[in-house]
Amino acid sequence: MILVCGGTKGGVGKSTIAISLTILRAAQGKDVLLVDADDQGTASDFTAVRNETLSDSSGAGYTSIKLHGAAVRTEVQRLAQKYDDIMIDVGGRDTTGQRAALSIADIVVIPFLPASFDIWALEIMSGLLEEAHAFNDRLKAIAILNRADPQGKDNQEAAAVAKELKSLTYLDAPLGNRKAFRNAASQGLSVTELRPKDAKAIKEITNLYEKIFSIAN
Ligand SMILES: Nc1ncnc2c1ncn2[C@@H]1O[C@H](COP(=O)(O)OP(=O)(O)OP(=O)(O)O)[C@@H](O)[C@H]1O
Ligand SMILES: [Mg+2]
């Protein structure tokens, strides 16, 4: 399966989610390729830290490469036969790399925050998805709430806007705004590996993982 963490908004959790899903998938014994299609190199930097953190054991547990622009399409198509799953992390803008990823993906996960700028960005993304669907009818587009508030109506309001958008589906699997996600990332780990454990963060990311892979299959 080819999964993209996408969207045209920066800083919404694309890399965090791409990395987490990669680690959870690899932990299931799958041979996973993480493609860093963002020139910022977040996923690659993360993997370098991870390889150091886990240097005594098996290392990262997945393969990571960097790709840019149209090569995201051509190389991923070639590599798709060699891996069980490919996860692509793209930059938070409408780039050639993101469009290339959308043209070959089975699923795109679009995180958004419960804030108006993010919801507007989701509407813009919806237009980009309409174009992508014209030449990739396999593509399933899923929006998920990230850094959700502990309470209050902003989460529901943001989810309601996402539910209105035609070219994507709102998946009810929010991730809360939790320090554990940041702490895990800085150590090259997923929240499932972080100690001390944050049970809520683990439950949220596991729920997201299970829902996404049940849609994908
Ligand atoms: N659920 C969460 N709770 C707390 N912090 C989070 C959560 N998700 C992401 N973050 C933090 O928010 C910041 C942005 O996340 P991330 O880098 O994953 O976003 P991005 O969409 O990939 O950004 P960019 O567009 O720059 O690539 C990071 O510091 C990350 O650790
Ligand atoms: Mg990123």
Image: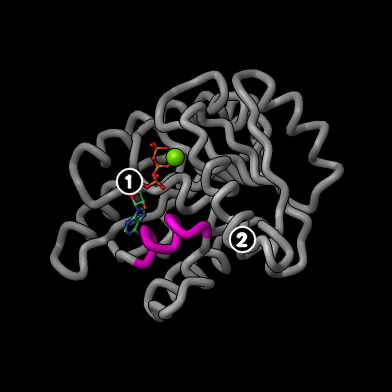
Numbered-mark total? 2
Percent across and percent down for residue 46 are 53, 48
Give how far across and how far down residue 202 sits, in percent: 46, 74
Q: Quadrant of residue 103?
A: top right
Rendering coords of residue 109 (x, y %): 50, 47
| Residue matched to label 2 | 23
Q: Is residue 184 left or right of residue 177?
A: right
Left or right of 175? Residue 53 is: right
- Range drawn in magenta: 180-188
Mark 1 lies within 8 Å of ligand 1 (Cβ measured): no
Seen at 30% across and 64% down, the residue is 179
Q: Amino acid at mark 2?
A: Ile
Q: Is residue 19 above or below residue 11?
A: below
- Residue of label 1: 164
Crowding at dot 1, Cα within 10 Å, few <14 / some 14-19 / many 20+, comes out as: few
The residue at the point 34 percent across, 41 percent down is 11
- Front-most of residues 124 and 53: 53
Residue placed furthest toward the left: 152
